[in-house]
Image (spheres, coloured by chain):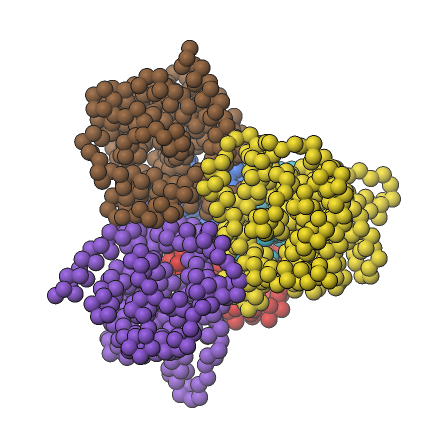
Chain colours: A purple, B red, C brown, D blue, E cyan, F yellow
């Protein structure tokens, strides 16, 4: 009861948080046909700065961290990415009127991680002063890459079987490389390396840190406009995508919360870390995943998986899952 | 000024496969090509011009023009691009007659 | 005498203000054929951030404001927008070699409000610590929209009469919608809503507020370059546009000052509010007005109205009217 | 590879009316169109390419290309766009013969 | 609708000389021209589309199209541009037959 | 010995400086085929803000400066620009398989000044709190313009002689104008003028100053990516360009250091000023020089001179010359 009350209260507060406000604002603007548009160059720059900020910060703090602690959470992050994809494929195989490869691609996108949702939860953690291990941002690729690779590999095995029924070979390293070369992971890893190897404190304090909140607010606005404008595409595909996109983030987050709970009791993974792991799992990739999937599973229909992730998955992850897992952590730990 | 008849192959397709299309063009022996950012609407979808921030930018269109002074090379490029990509990616291709100055350049 | 002295002194100081310095700098760069150019994406982003800043701030403070106080000033703002347009049309009808619809369009643009001039006067108010009511930025649309709507409606009635002489119907709601959907008003209203409904204090303090001054300086540079490069267009149309654009901002501002004075004595409208109202009236729309007019009165020549507003109206509003109405308020109140 | 003769309608006009022009194109039954950002100089004015910050961006040019396999549809599009817009907005339109692969697509 | 045969001159060259090329075009008496940002690959070099930050931006390509209803003016433009620039700058030029509505406009 | 030790220590520290870290990070990203790209609009805006910051700061401080002190250093800056070009032309004339005009152009580019290197050394000076005269940034054009003009004039004289053997006339003023109109010098001079004539303290402190470090970090990233991607072009031309580009920055810096030393003892030019003068000399133009040379010496191959400057010259100037001349100044003064 208390938990439900807390969650609803927090949901209400969340609706007063500017992060969500900008997201909803973006949707409303798009719905009202506003001509306001954030230029593409600005969008790209904002994503770059956000990920650099997360990466540099992580890198600077990892220096004094005990990386052995990271082993189990990193392993769990991988497991979560993989399990989400397998569950997703299974679920879609049960649903009617779903093209096989569209199911694979959607499952892959929901196994991967959303840079925008991740930045949003980082701001909330800061606002609430919830502590977590410095290396948690480094878990991102451990969940993101296996999910994308697995979805693409399985889809290609399936497609090759369809065609020929004989031996199959998929270029796994090619897909990993493609992920790492994507702009989101590149920026995050560059930031980590710079934070670890150079002394970026002053440039971090004078630039990346102060701009973080503001740039996030604008990214939320863009995600809101994008969410709205993709809803039409989503409508044209089976409605099951919307249903999956609404419920699965919560389920994925709960799964991650469970594994995080185990890590908490075995290696002392912090409650803050568990929240972040859960939100990563709940999020679905919106920036770097789609192009990787588009080339990895070209016959899958992008309207299905991008629509599901951007129009439903990301809003649910930000509006519902962030408050949910914070309250859950407060109730449980 | 003597002008020589030549062909211009035009390909309009998704930006995400532009690199692959250019590789095909080069492998067919064309001496060059020109690329334009484009938006458009076809049988599959609406593609925005690269003006507003497109969260998934790689799905904008690109128009590629290739001048060849040799009809069979034009045919080869069109055919290969169509076979390699147009089942899974949106795209169209067509041909125009043009007149060039220096046939040895193409 | 004292007043004139004060005004000239302030004009001199104003010439030392970086705001005007950047405006003049932009004109000089353009005049000298410099290749320096601020990319379009940056320009759009700057305008967005400036208007969001004004909107959010207004929204945050409106919360505790007594909105009943706003009624009379809002009504006066509407009256001013309408009267400026009517006077403008009348004046142009007296001038020789003015195409009828060009006069309507120019009057409409001068009745509407300039986002850049408004941002510039906000900085001066802050620098001089002149207080004003929190809701004053919300007067913007009350002046802007009626002016544009009236100009377009009257022009279309005129044009239809020319053609057929029979019944006329103009889509007023379509024009209002078009104004509200424009990028400037969208950003301002979004900011107001976010300021009112969410708690954007931290993102405001860390991002929108600190960037305001710097972004304004760059916007002034852009307006200066634009002013110079449009002068050629203005030369090609009747010289009366330049004359109107030079004197009318002062007249419009005085009109607004008068009404503001009445509001001061009846409902206690603050002297700072009177200054802002006067500068709004003095300003002529440069960002959102032109596209609305272009589609509303397509047969009007954009070189006439945009040239008049951007090349003469905005520089006069910023360089002369801002100091003028501050000094006038100091003399009067 | 058999190619079929078709027509390409080209329209160069102000960006601000691009949406209206596209509506006309669709109402005439064309299967698609492609848009390019353009700058230019004509009888009315200089229009900058969208590089520098144009305070009034909507006055840049746009080029719209429409492929139709039917001459009368080409005519109809050109005629309607001209009548609807070219009195008040700058713009030109012309036609090119092209060769397409799959006439049923257009 | 009566259409009239006309010529379209197409010039693809480095952005840095776009202004000079436009001056030549105007001096030859053309009534207008249209410019497009382009990337490309030719005999000399790879030119990026203006997407990524090019530290030396002026080396991107531009495509300029000029419609003339007069063959000798087309020839003159092509010849002058070629002679003035194509020894030192990369660039190609070609001609297309088009059909226009109002020959007196060009 | 001590000197060498100091230099190596500082080189090591330099490798930990984020400035160099971002440069190397950019090279690595490009080498690994990352799709990360900073949009062109952002790049242009960053360069603008950096140069405005340097200019405004210089302008504000020049107000109280004794400009007579500037005479000798300004003269030396000119001499350095000219001498570097003459030496460069001479050196290239001795090397095999160098096209004459390519040598002229490369010498011109290395005589001119790099805005990015200059911004980088300014940050180091600030970090190390090394003082220098306020007017030192104003030396930039005194070195930059004569170098470009001389290279272009000599190349054209050479080319005309080749063709006709008769009288030659080159439009010197045209080249100077072209330099001044370029975006880099325009921004620097605009900043100087605004700093000198207006009171930009508040906009400077709230915008240009805080963004400086962060924008520089991103510019370094871009320069690194550019350096890597131009190496291929450089490979296609004679290898002597790479050799020249590696050693000449050090030699040019030493030459400037010597002249700066004389100015120190005759007119009291500060050690910090000597460092800045040396780094200016060591740097090779990467932003504004190339377009000027491209139109000034059209027959020169841009792959040669841009490749040499961007891929080798700038990294050497930043990674080696900045620490070298700081240590040298500490050893000598
Ligand atoms: N009839 C057409 N005329 C001009 N461009 C077209 C046409 N049909 C398709 N296109 C272009 O080709 C792209 C891909 O078409 P599609 O494969 O039909 O989706 C579209 O986005 C348009 O840019
Ligand atoms: N002769 C021409 N050749 C190529 N493009 C032209 C020509 N005339 C006009 N245009 C284009 O059409 C636009 C509108 O022309 P106008 O209506 O004459 O101002 C111009 O901005 C140019 O982009
Ligand atoms: N065969 C071709 N087809 C299409 N465009 C070409 C061709 N050759 C050259 N170009 C374009 O013309 C530009 C200059 O060519 P070039 O002078 O050969 O380097 C290239 O960057 C391309 O944009
Ligand atoms: Na996920
Ligand atoms: Na007004
Ligand atoms: Na130098």
Instruction: Indicate the position of residue F89 as horizontal and vertical percent values.
Output: 80, 51
Please, is residue B69 above or below residue D76 in the view?
below
Asked if one can make out residue D75 in the rendered structure from this viewpoint, the answer is: yes
The total of numbered circles placed on residues is: 0
Q: Nearer the viewer, residue A227 or F129?
A: F129
In the picture shown, does residue F122 fall above or below E105?
below
**Residue drawn at (87%, 44%) of the image:** F165
- Residue found farthest to the top: C1
Q: Say which quadrant the C terminus of chain D sits in.
A: bottom left
Q: Is residue C65 above or below residue A231?
A: above
In this rendering, would C268 be left or right of D14? left
Q: Is residue B68 left or right of residue C165?
A: right
Residue at image point 46% right, 74% down: A176
What residue occupies the far bottom of the structure in this picture?
A166
Q: Position of residue D4 (x, y in %)?
A: 48, 63
Between D64 and A165, the one nearer to me in the picture: A165
Is residue A117 visible from the viewing direction of this image? Answer: no
Residue visible at 84% across and 48% down in the picture: F162
Residue at the image position 48 percent from the left and 30 percent from the top = C17
**x, y percent for residue A32:** 28, 47
Residue D83, horizontal then vertical, whole percent: 39, 40
Residue lying furthest right in this view? Answer: F165
Decide which of C294, A248 is in the foreground and name it. Answer: A248
Residue F99 in which image quadrant: bottom right
Occupied quadrant, residue C276: top left
Residue C76 or E18: which is nearer the viewer?
A: C76
């Amino acid at each position: 009861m208390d938990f439900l009350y807390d969650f609803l209260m927090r949901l209400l507060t969340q609706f007063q948080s500017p992060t969500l406000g900008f997201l909803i604002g973006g949707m409303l603007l798009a719905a009202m046909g506003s001509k306001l548009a954030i230029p593409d160059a600005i969008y790209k720059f904002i994503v770059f700065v956000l990920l650099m900020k997360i990466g540099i910060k992580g890198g600077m703090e990892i220096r004094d961290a005990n990386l052995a602690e990271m082993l189990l959470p990193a392993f769990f992050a991988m497991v979560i990415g993989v399990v989400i994809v397998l569950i997703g494929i299974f679920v879609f195989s049960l649903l009617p009127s779903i093209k096989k490869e569209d199911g694979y691609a959607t499952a892959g996108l929901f196994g991967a991680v959303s840079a925008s949702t991740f930045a949003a939860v980082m701001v909330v953690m800061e606002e609430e002063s919830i502590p977590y291990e410095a290396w948690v941002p480094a878990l991102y690729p451990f969940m993101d890459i296996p999910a994308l690779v697995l979805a693409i590999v399985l889809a290609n095995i399936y497609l090759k079987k369809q065609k020929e029924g004989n031996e199959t070979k998929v270029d796994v390293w090619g897909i990993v490389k493609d992920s790492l070369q994507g702009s989101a992971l590149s920026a995050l890893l560059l930031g980590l390396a710079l934070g670890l190897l150079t002394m970026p404190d002053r440039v971090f304090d004078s630039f990346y840190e102060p701009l973080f909140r503001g740039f996030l607010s604008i990214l939320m606005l863009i995600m809101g406009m994008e969410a709205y404008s993709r809803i039409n595409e989503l409508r044209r595909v089976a409605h099951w995508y919307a249903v999956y996109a609404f419920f699965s983030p919560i389920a994925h987050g709960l799964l991650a919360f469970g594994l995080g709970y185990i890590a908490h009791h075995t290696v002392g993974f912090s409650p803050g870390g568990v929240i972040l792991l859960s939100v990563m799992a709940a999020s679905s990739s919106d920036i770097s995943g789609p192009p990787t999937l588009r080339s990895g599973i070209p016959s899958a229909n992008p309207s299905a998986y991008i629509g599901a992730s951007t129009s439903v998955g990301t809003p649910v992850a930000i509006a519902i899952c962030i408050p949910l897992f914070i309250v859950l952590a407060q109730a449980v730990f | 000024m003597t002008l020589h008849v030549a062909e211009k192959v035009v390909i309009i397709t998704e930006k995400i496969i532009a690199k692959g299309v250019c590789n095909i063009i080069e492998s067919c022996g064309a001496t060059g090509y020109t690329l334009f950012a484009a938006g458009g609407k076809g049988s599959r979808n609406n593609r925005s011009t690269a003006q507003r921030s497109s969260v998934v930018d790689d799905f904008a269109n690109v128009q590629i023009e290739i001048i060849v002074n040799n009809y069979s090379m034009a045919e080869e490029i069109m055919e290969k691009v169509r076979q390699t990509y147009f089942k899974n990616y949106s795209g169209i291709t067509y041909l125009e007659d043009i007149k060039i100055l220096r046939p040895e350049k193409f």
